[in-house]
Image (cartoon, helix red, strand yellow):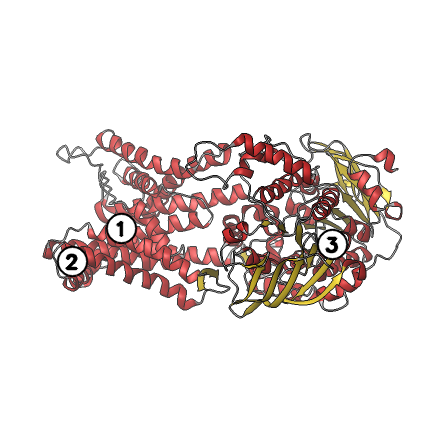
């Protein structure tokens, strides 16, 4: 490649106590290049970018941008040198307009005006040039996640960024938004910007990047041109061993376990009809915020339907409460595993038994049988390979993947008749995804009916037997997964069912 | 860059060391104030210790002070643990005291002593619990912040007590002093030691601390209320009825504070005045925080706070340092405790 090197990191090492987050990392970015930094959670990607941007100070090594060495630990110097960073969690003020968010921090503190007209002209020009359409006067709180991300990118461009760093930019985006983002990024690279994006999603990296740098355990383990590698090779480089996502074996489904007819909850759903059979997985795909949360609440017993019926084994649920659903053999995996799934400050064993605490095997006469609880936790830990702590460790010490394995395990250990799994692998790395998928498929093979609610097309294609899309509280008719491809699912998720059919 | 890093496990030594270190820091800081007041610091602290523990009388006085503080400390600790911010122990204490006085007077219940004493304790506890259930209902129904309602009800309770002891419950034999009719002799708590004010209320308080510790550590209710306090969303997902938990916690918390008031009437004064409580309810919050909400810790924290108050009076008489220094020490130890707790839970990394 002949384009000049705009950014180089040399021998970056960063330790946190006994943990070496970055170990002698060296990489270069050329002008107009789209570089992907690939690695599992904890591989050191974010730490590296934070050093580059001056949030952290490296123990050794140096960062050079456009031929000038950057002083360590000075984000302002990085901005001045033309580096812009878009964090995974946006730093926007929801109550301000787009233009106010973009301008904030660029004007002297005591200047009387925002310089709004000049700023507006520049913002409109930038958004036209780079294809980042957004209304400058919209309130940021009213924007979609994808639009907010555009505002973040515009913020960086407004500050004359010529190098753009995006940390897990698609973690919060839908499939379509992600495709659009990468098209935009490629356009920006063609206009001469240099871009680094962090990801652990293989297909994105393959599709979008020019060059891929793989980090594992804080070290650069490989560097590949995107055109000269494969998903399998990248997966192996990233995890350090061969990982194959488990495959779904076809099997004949049994009797109907869960059946919804005309289901609604206070107008948020519009007469949903679906059913799940024993030994079958029904995948509900859809862009987040289209009624999935309500559907999950209903299927987990947190809410009762305001219209329609939810039948378990052909009968209404006797006790429509979370405990009643658990007692009826429903395993529940909530979308927000740390918010709803576990109590971070409580011990692993307490989290393992919390929803079954009142069952006679875990308590007698109001007193908790702690030995039985610990024993149950130990069996879940062993069977589902939960790592990072024993029965008495606080669960907040566990990684996301291990928390999810515990949540799945405490349900699957009881051989549930129905498993409700909402976004079961969101934010997990490749190894954890494979093991969660393996457990869900094993439950299905054992005859559990699985209701899978997910935004991840690959996941739905890998796990589900039938697929329905949820759009604005409505469900599409089901299609068999054999007839589903990403394009058709994309159309279904956009609410265009007739064309998709 | 120096960062605070959460500790995986807080070692026992750090958990016990934190309050001790906090107290030492508080005493050192208060020492500066004592020196500014022109008194020799070490001598002042010696006087304080002597004043609190130097004689049979002073020991029994300190322990008599400790009993209500244990109960109001427990009241705050059980509520805070479930994230119910009961700032109203002072008011609950007063209505508990008033209920015990009303029921225990010669116009009240007529029961033999072994039944009358538990009945009055229960009456005080129920009065305290009812006073907390009101704000709880407002929170559950309308989302009204219970910090505000419980705090303001303290003043309502105080003025209500004042109205009653100037009115229907006024003692006609008190030469016009605003005090309630006294409880009958059978309602007075037996003394632990003869010729002292120390009564069996102390045993009741310590026993309840042990009981609360047992309930919190070993029962379904204890575990569920902990989960409800730490993460209400996850508790709800697990099927724990948050309303039920909060109502039970409110009964326990308000009941403990009301019981403290009843015991103070039956054990020490025999009647109610508006200055029955030198801030036992508010100080209970400090006691609970010093104990890091641990019920056993509450016993020791209450003893420490009682020591400071009783000792400071004696120091003040001997050296002329204002006895307000006790408030300063207690407040400083609370602040130091908050810092010490975070240091125990985190470690410094750079």
Q: In this orientation, does residue A250 appear?
A: yes
Percent x, y for residue A454? 73, 47
Which SS class for mark 3?
A: loop
- The residue at 34%/35% (across/down) is B152
Q: Nearer the viewer, residue A13 or B252?
A: A13
Q: Which mark is residue B35?
A: 2
Depth-wise, is mark 1 or mark 2 nearer the camera? 2
Circle 2: is it few (<14), some (14-19), or many (20+) Cα within 10 Å? some
Which SS class for mark 2?
A: helix
Residue A384 vs A123, above or below: the answer is: below
Depth-wise, is mark 3 or mark 2 nearer the camera? 3
Which SS class for mark 1?
A: loop
Tell me the residue that label 1 is attached to.
B189
- The residue at 52%/54% (across/down) is B223
Residue A205 vs A386, above or below: the answer is: above
Residue B9 is left or right of residue A374, and the answer is: left
Percent x, y for residue A491? 81, 38
Q: On what subunit does the disc labeled 3 rest?
A: A
Q: On what subunit does the disc labeled 2 rest?
A: B
Q: Are marks 3 and 1 on the same chain?
A: no
Alpha carbon separation for disc pair 1 and 2: 42 Å
Tell me the residue that label 3 is attached to.
A209
Q: Quadrant of residue A434?
A: bottom right
Q: Nearer the viewer, residue A168 or A258?
A: A168
Percent x, y for residue A376? 64, 63
Q: In this orientation, does residue B210 appear?
A: no
Percent x, y for residue A385? 68, 66
């Amino acid at each position: 490649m002949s384009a000049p090197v705009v950014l180089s990191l040399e021998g970056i090492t960063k330790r946190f106590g006994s943990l070496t987050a970055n170990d002698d990392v060296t990489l270069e970015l050329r002008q107009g290049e789209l570089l992907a930094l690939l690695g599992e959670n904890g591989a050191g990607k974010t730490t590296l970018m934070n050093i580059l941007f001056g949030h952290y100070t490296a123990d050794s090594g140096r960062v050079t941008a456009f031929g000038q060495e950057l002083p360590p630990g000075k984000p302002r110097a990085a901005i001045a040198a033309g580096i812009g960073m878009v964090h995974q969690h946006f730093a926007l003020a929801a109550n301000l307009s787009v233009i106010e968010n973009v301008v904030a921090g660029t004007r002297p503190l005591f200047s009387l005006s925002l310089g709004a007209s000049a700023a507006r002209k520049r913002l409109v020009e930038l958004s036209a040039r780079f294809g980042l359409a957004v209304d400058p006067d919209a309130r940021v709180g009213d924007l979609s996640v994808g639009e907010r991300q555009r505002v973040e990118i515009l913020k960086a461009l407004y500050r004359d960024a010529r190098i753009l760093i995006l940390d897990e930019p698609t973690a919060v985006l839908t499939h379509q938004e992600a495709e659009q983002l990468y098209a935009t990024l490629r356009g920006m690279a063609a206009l001469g910007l240099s871009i680094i994006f962090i990801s652990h999603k293989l297909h994105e990296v393959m599709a979008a990047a020019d060059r891929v740098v793989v980090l594992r355990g804080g070290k650069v383990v490989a560097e590949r041109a995107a055109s000269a590698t494969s998903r399998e090779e990248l997966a192996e480089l990233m995890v350090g061993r061969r990982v194959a996502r488990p495959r779904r074996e076809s099997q004949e489904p049994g009797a109907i376990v869960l059946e919804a007819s005309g289901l609604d909850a206070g107008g948020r759903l519009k007469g949903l009809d679906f059913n799940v059979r024993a030994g079958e997985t029904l995948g509900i795909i859809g862009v987040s915020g289209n009624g999935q949360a309500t559907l999950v609440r209903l299927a987990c017993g947190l809410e009762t339907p305001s219209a329609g019926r939810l039948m378990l084994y052909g009968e209404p649920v006797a006790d429509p409460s979370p405990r009643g659903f658990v007692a009826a053999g429903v395993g529940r995996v909530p979308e927000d595993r740390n918010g709803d799934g576990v109590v971070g400050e409580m011990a692993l064993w307490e989290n393992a038994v919390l929803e079954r605490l009142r069952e006679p095997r875990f308590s007698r006469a109001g007193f908790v049988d702690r030995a039985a609880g610990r024993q149950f936790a130990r069996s879940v830990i062993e069977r589902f390979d939960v790592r990072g702590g024993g029965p008495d460790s606080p669960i907040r010490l566990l990684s996301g993947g291990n928390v999810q394995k515990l949540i799945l395990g405490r349900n699957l250990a009881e051989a549930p008749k129905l498993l409700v799994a909402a976004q079961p692998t969101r934010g997990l790395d490749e190894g954890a995804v494979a093991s969660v998928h393996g457990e869900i498929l094993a439950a299905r093979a054992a005859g559990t009916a699985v209701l899978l609610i997910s935004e991840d097309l690959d996941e739905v294609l890998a796990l589900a037997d039938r697929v329905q899309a949820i759009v604005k509280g409505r469900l599409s008719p089901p299609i068999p997964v054999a007839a589903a491809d990403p394009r058709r699912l994309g159309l279904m998720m956009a609410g265009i069912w007739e064309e998709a059919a | 860059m120096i960062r605070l890093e959460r500790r995986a496990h807080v070692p026992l030594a750090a958990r016990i060391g934190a309050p001790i270190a906090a107290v030492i820091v508080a005493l050192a800081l208060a020492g500066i104030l004592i020196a500014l007041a022109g008194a020799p610091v070490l001598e002042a602290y010696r006087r304080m210790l002597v004043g609190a523990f130097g004689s049979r009388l002073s020991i029994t006085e300190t322990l008599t002070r400790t009993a209500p503080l244990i109960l109001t400390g427990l009241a705050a600790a059980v509520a805070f643990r479930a994230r119910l911010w009961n700032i109203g122990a002072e008011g609950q204490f007063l209505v508990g005291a008033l209920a015990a006085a009303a029921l225990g007077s010669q116009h009240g219940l007529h029961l033999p002593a072994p039944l009358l004493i538990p009945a009055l304790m229960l009456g005080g506890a129920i009065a305290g619990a009812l006073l907390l259930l009101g704000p709880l209902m407002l929170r559950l129904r309308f989302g009204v912040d219970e910090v505000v309602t419980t705090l303001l009800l303290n003043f309502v309770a105080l003025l209500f007590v004042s109205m009653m002891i100037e009115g229907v419950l006024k003692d006609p034999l008190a030469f016009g002093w605003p005090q309630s009719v006294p409880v009958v002799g059978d309602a007075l708590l037996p003394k632990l030691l003869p010729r002292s004010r120390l009564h069996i209320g102390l045993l009741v308080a310590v026993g309840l601390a042990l009981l609360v510790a047992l309930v919190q550590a070993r029962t379904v209710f204890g575990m569920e209320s902990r989960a409800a306090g730490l993460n209400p969303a996850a508790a709800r997902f697990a099927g724990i009825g948050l309303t039920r938990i909060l109502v039970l916690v409110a009964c326990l918390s308000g009941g403990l504070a009301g019981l403290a008031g009843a015991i103070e009437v039956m054990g020490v004064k025999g009647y109610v005045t508006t200055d029955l409580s030198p801030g036992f309810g508010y100080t209970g919050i400090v006691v609970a925080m010093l104990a890091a909400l641990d019920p056993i810790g509450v016993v020791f924290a209450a003893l420490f706070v009682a020591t400071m108050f009783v000792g400071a009076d004696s120091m003040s008489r001997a050296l002329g340092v204002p006895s307000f220094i006790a408030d300063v020490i207690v407040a400083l130890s609370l602040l130091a405790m908050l810092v010490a707790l975070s240091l125990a839970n985190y470690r410094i990394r750079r």
